[in-house]
Image (spheres, rainbow, N blue to C red):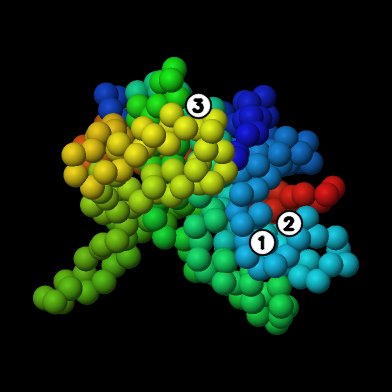
Amino acid sequence: MHTCAVPSDALEDWLESYPSIKGNYGHLLLEQRTTVDDDLADALRPYFESAHLDAREHFHKLAGMSVHPDASDTGYHARYPDCLEDTAKRGLFGEVMAGMMTEHYKFVGNHDWTVPIFLFRHHEDVERYLFALSRDPARARMVWGRFGTDFIAISLNKHGEVTRYLAGEAKWRKTLTESAVEELMLGRKSEDDDGNMVRSGGIWDQLNADTQTPHGLRQLQRLLIERDPVAWSPTIASLDEALLISGGKILPRTNLILLSGNSAAGRDEGCPVLGWEKMPAEYTAPHDLQVVELILSNGQELIATLYSSLWEDV
């Protein structure tokens, strides 16, 4: 289970926040205000280790590797998530930061969110990759991204039952230019049957077309059953009601979009890429929406430092 507390003091020192909530639309701009150093990495590392622990144990077990291999052990070069290439690590970074932001900051609706476990084990290509790489170092390659919801957070009542859930989409881009964000939100351009250039497949399309109850909610429930069914029994039972195909309890939903990356050249301080004044017109889903923009100045350096040092003392 994910049990590490958010490094709140480090976040407050590291990031300047500009929050805004307009009805059922929340926008939070976060800007880096201190340099990346070893102290920041040390403060963030336990949260990252906790977020990846379930997937690490799962992938290593399936590959036949020790969870915490010594340097001399066979397959050490394939340990998760160290063995993944930089693009994959940057994607993972965004998803972990989405969890950290959700647990730390106040979002639209002012709900208390918890992330009991991250969904990283549900990445079939990484599972296949570690199995092959642990047996043959020459198999090093890029991996395909994970399908489905990037992560799920839940809000619980005093009995431990789920009262609302949050479905998050986290994206990293080296530089958050307007064109890069436009492609993320609206999708890539392609030619339709009439020869017109159109955009499709972006984040807006994904959220607008998603089912009321996403597959990620079932994945979360199964992980709770496997990892700690006693402590999470009220949560598991309440999810059973919500996951019925018909006649189930409809849980209110909040959608989260986290965009993280380095600041574009010429961008003014405190200036977001997406508008904060009102709900974006492209968003037509009926659920509350929270947007977080995490603007860094040397994000790839922080990611490299973090992911090269996970479990280094084990």
State whether residue 276 is above or below residue 172: above
Left or right: 28 in relation to 134: left
Q: Which residue is mark 3?
A: 105
Q: Amino acid at mark 3?
A: Tyr
Which of these two is toward me, 145 or 94?
A: 145
Left or right: 246 in relation to 98: left
Instruction: Choose top left, top right, bottom left or bottom right for residue 140.
Output: bottom right
Report helix, strand or loop for mark 3: loop
Q: Residues within 10 Å of mark 1 (few under 14, many from 20)?
A: few
Q: Residues within 10 Å of mark 3 (few under 14, many from 20)?
A: some
CA distance for labels 1 and 3: 35 Å
Depth-wise, is mark 2 or mark 3 nearer the camera?
A: 2
The residue shown at (52%, 38%) is 229
Label 1 or label 2, whichever comes before in sequence order:
1
Left or right: 106 in relation to 52: left
The percent position of residue 215, horizontal first and vertical second, equals 35, 51
The circle drawn on residue 67 is 2
Look at the numbered discs 1 and 2 and tell me whether their residues touch, using CB distance below 8 Å: yes
Left or right: 2 in relation to 83: left
The percent position of residue 180, horizontal first and vertical second, equals 42, 57
Label 2 or label 3, whichever comes before in sequence order:
2
State whether residue 299 is above or below residue 73: above
Report helix, strand or loop for mark 2: loop
Label 1 or label 3, whichever comes before in sequence order:
1
The circle drawn on residue 61 is 1
State whether residue 226 is above or below residue 200: above
Instruction: Choose top left, top right, bottom left or bottom right for residue 235.
Output: top left
Which of these two is toward me, 247 or 180?
A: 247
CA distance for labels 2 and 3: 33 Å
User: Residue farthest to the left?
Assistant: 194
The residue shown at (54%, 56%) is 121
Q: Residues within 10 Å of mark 2 (few under 14, many from 20)?
A: some
